[in-house]
Image (cartoon, helix red, strand yellow):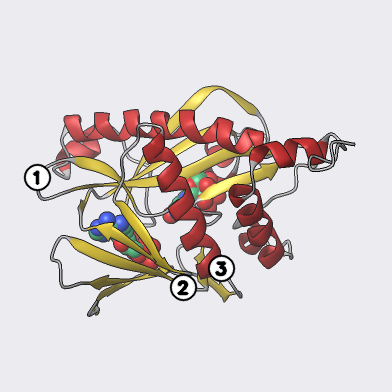
Amino acid sequence: MPETLIYEGKAKKVFATDDAAVLLHRYKDDATAYNAQKRGSWKDKGKTNATMSAAMFAYLEANGVPSHFIEQVDETTIKTKKLTMLPVEVVVRNVAAGSLSRLLGFEEGRRLKAPIIELCYKNDSLGDPLLNWHHFRELGVSDEDLEFCEELGLKVNGVLAPFFDERGVLLVDFKIEVGRDAEGHLMLADEISPDTCRFWDKETGERLDKDRFRRDLGGVEEAYAEMLRRVTADASSIRSRASGKDEEGGA
Ligand code: ADP
Ligand code: UDP
């Protein structure tokens, strides 16, 4: 399939294909943090994020949440529908961390009474600020679209939080994006990976996500590999390992 680079972002390259409605997203090994002031790169990051995104989109689809995902093409590339993106980053939180801890003065790790949804303006030069609905109306984003974003965020959380829980991982928070196809349908887009989610090991509290890079905790390559392993492994084998039983032998 002929590829034409149409956009290079911080974490992915986006290519047009011979089908105007289809894109390829090639996940890079590069990482940025703090609005691109911190930069880095590590082995297999692109492979992990592409493979995990593909698995999560397929799982969400099977659980009633359609997305832009069509198929994984190779280790680092996924094929998607081409969408017109809303300028919105939808953040969903179950546990206080990062900017929410700073905003509310909450200790990291404090369980929230209910999931908190935040709508941020996807605008690098402004540092993706947290906005309210009045600001978004001024930017031309409709109430209907914002309502869709909030409902989608809750739905994705409702599917993914139990999925990760079964794999020994606390889904602390995550960011998703939304776009509209040529027929006018809004749907989930972009990626779902350790770059865009906070994952904490349920037993040890160990961070298994991009905070290892942001905060110079070390072991970032290993943490991403561990998350990929847990997502692609069967959940029952993880449960039996955790309880000390050998699943295969039954002893
Ligand atoms: P950034 O632009 O923040 O540096 P990336 O490196 O991840 O991010 O680049 C991917 C870009 O593609 C993002 O701007 C994202 O909003 C956009 N995008 C994600 N999914 C789609 C899609 N299905 N159609 C069009 N654009 C998309
Ligand atoms: N997030 C993201 N992209 C962004 C900002 C945040 O994927 O541009 C994700 C981040 O990985 C975390 C959640 O959204 O899972 C909430 O991030 P927070 O606002 O706490 O970010 P911080 O200010 O700590 O970087």
Using the numbered discs, state the Cα–Cα distance from disc 3 to disc 2 in whole angstroms: 7 Å
The residue at the point 31 percent across, 45 percent down is 67
User: Considering only vertical position in the picture, is 244 above or below 123?
Assistant: above
Residue 84 position in % (x across, y down): 18, 54
- Determine the residue located farthest toward the right in the rendered image: 251
Q: Amino acid at mark 1?
A: Glu
User: Considering only vertical position in the picture, is 110 above or below 241?
Assistant: above
User: Toward the viewer: 97 or 76?
Assistant: 76
Q: Are marks 3 and 1 in contact (CB under 8 Å)?
A: no
Using the numbered discs, state the Cα–Cα distance from disc 3 to disc 1 in whole angstroms: 34 Å
- In the visual, does 3 lie left or right of 101? left
Earlier-in-chain disc, 3 versus 1 = 3
Q: Secondary structure at mark 3?
A: helix
Q: Is mark 2 within 8 Å of ligand 1?
A: yes
Mark 1 packing: few (<14 Cα in 10 Å), some, or many (20+)? few
Residue receiving disc 2: 28
User: Toward the viewer: 59 or 113?
Assistant: 59
The residue at the point 11 percent across, 42 percent down is 184
Query: Quarter of the image holding residue 42?
Result: bottom right
Q: Amino acid at mark 3?
A: Lys
Residue 2 position in % (x across, y down): 22, 80
Residue receiving disc 1: 183
- Determine the residue located farthest toward the front in the rendered image: 249
Q: Are marks 3 and 2 in contact (CB under 8 Å)?
A: yes
Earlier-in-chain disc, 1 versus 2 = 2
Q: Are marks 1 and 2 in contact (CB under 8 Å)?
A: no
Residue 156 position in % (x across, y down): 42, 35
- In the visual, does 192 lie left or right of 187? right
Q: Is mark 3 within 8 Å of ligand 1?
A: no
